Image: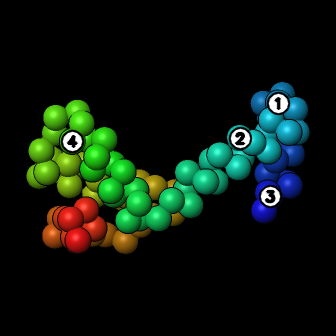
Amino acid sequence: MIDRPLVERVAASTGLAPGEAARVVDDVLAWYRESVESYVVRRHGELRLRGQHNPEIFRAIAAELAERVVAAPSLTERQLRRIVYG
């Protein structure tokens, strides 16, 4: 469900056509709808590909989660590890 007032505001402030603004809004909302578990697993994989190790990865993910628009609960390294490895 698209938030019409938000789409109208994005269209007005960016000069995008309403259809383009709706796609942008939908994409941003989808980004923030990602579950904490999915986010942690995805970011862990991305950071591993960059050669980082778990202690620094889990610190980075914990910091990122605290900065999300709708902040995730504070998770310990153990909780983050359990999300990734079960």
Marks 1 and 4: which is nearer the front?
4
Q: Earlier in the sequence, mark 3 or mark 1?
A: 3
Which residue in the structure is indicated by mark 3?
3
Q: Which mark is residue 57?
A: none
For mark 3, does the 10 Å Cα neighbourhood hold few (<14), some (14 to 19), or many (20 or more) residues? few
Q: What residue lies at 80% left-to-right and 58% top-to-bottom?
A: 3
What kind of residue is marked 2?
Val
Q: Is residue 70 left or right of residue 56?
A: right
Which comes before the other along the chain, label 1 or label 4?
Answer: 1
Q: Position of residue 37 (x, y in %)?
A: 38, 65
Whole-angstrom CA distance, mark 3 to mark 2, is 12 Å
| Label 2: few (<14), some (14–19) or many (≥20) C-alpha neighbours in 10 Å | some
Q: Position of residue 74 (x, y in %)?
A: 31, 69
Q: Position of residue 65 (x, y in %)?
A: 37, 58
Q: Are marks 2 and 1 in contact (CB under 8 Å)?
A: yes
Residue tagged 1: 16
In the image shown, does 66 or 51 lie closer to the viewer?
A: 51
Question: Label 4 is placed on what type of residue?
Answer: Arg
- Residue at numbered disc 4: 48
- Dots 3, 1 in contact, CB < 8 A: no
Q: Which residue is mark 2?
A: 24
Q: Considering depth in this image, is 72 or 54 the residue closer to the camera?
A: 54
Residue placed farthest to the front in the image? 86
The tag earlier along the polypeptide, 2 or 1, is: 1
Residue 80 visible to an observer of this rendering:
no
Q: Secondary structure at mark 4?
A: helix
